Amino acid sequence: MAKWVGQAIFGAAVLAGFLFLVSCMQPRSVSDPLRAERAAPPMPAERSEAPLGAEEDPYAEPVQPLTVRQCGQCHPSIYNALREEGLGHKFACQGCHEKFHVADQQEAMPRCLDCHGEPHVNLDKFRNCLTCHDDAHAPRRLGITVPLIDGCADCHRAPGEDLRLAPSAHTALGCISCHHDRHGLIPSCLECHQPHFASQPAPACLSCHPAHQPKQLAFSPPVDPRTCAGCHGEVYRQWSATPSRHGAVGCVECHAEHALVPKCTECHPQPHSEKILAAYPRCLTCHLDPHNPPVKRP
């Protein structure tokens, strides 16, 4: 008996579980609130048929041309190039670009010759301006390109002539050996040469040595006497130790040209009587050394 009751209870439990599963698999009625909420499509937002006011209508006012700064918001590198190195090109973008954002970018690019005419003497060789001026927004920032290097003398004729007329070690160098990083670079002489004295500033080199004719010394006073000491050390030592008035006279005040030996009479036209000058026509017979002449001792 107990066994039969247990089997009946077990059968009833299995049947109840089966009916529960079947009820879960049936679709819910739309009347079910949860089902209705999930099944209902979203209602579109109500559209206002009232016209927009002038302040809300984005098309109420005519569009003004973009300002340079507005162009720069999308083209910051171009804006900064013009701002820092634009020179004569620092004007409104529309001054060159009559078209914007076209499929063929060449349509937006102006012709340099429309404004610049024929800027160079050998225009046939430099017909493509961007060969040298590779950034029209920084026109003087020329890249070191092969056409530029090959054509230095076409625009810079004087340096080429100087190098040819006064041969030196510089004559054998290509322009790019010194003007290496960018067009227009004036290098420091100390990149290759030692100074005449330890604290000599680099610009002092050019006060005597023209860069393209370095052996053609041309003094531009004042010249620090220590510069001369680089080659004329013994003379400098004698001069710097003299108690005479010559110790207050700089080298180039007497030697106005390199290797020039001046006449004493240029500064001392009539130092002695005619009788003494006749007996001793050569000043150094008595005054011995012009850089350290003997002086009267008290």
Image (cartoon, grey):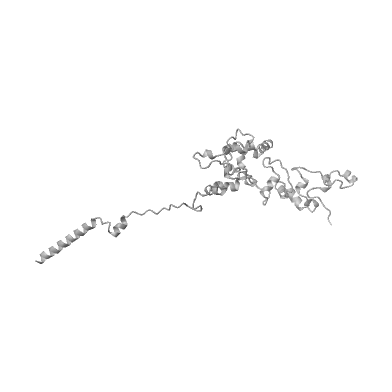
193 vs 57, left or right, is: right
* Figure check: 20 above or below 184: below
Q: Considering depth in this image, is 169 or 84 the residue closer to the camera? A: 84
Judged from this view, the residue extending furthest toward the left is: 1
Q: Which picture quadrant has residue 283?
A: top right
In the rendered image, which quarter is residue 217 located in?
A: top right
| Direction from residue 56 to residue 195 in the image, left or right | right
Considering the image in quadrants, where does the C terminus appear?
Answer: bottom right
Q: Give the image location of residue 238, x and y in percent.
A: 76, 50
The spot of residue 225 in percent (x, y) is 73, 49
What residue is rendered at 10% in x and 67% in y? Answer: 2
Residue at (75, 52) in percent of width and height: 240
Residue plotted at (21% across, 59% down): 20
- Which quarter of the rendered picture does the N terminus lie within? bottom left
- From the viewer's side, name the closer residue of 88 and 32: 32
Rendering coords of residue 59 (x, y %): 50, 49
> In the orientation shown, which residue stands out farthest toward the front?
50
- Residue 21 or residue 56, whichever sits in front: 56
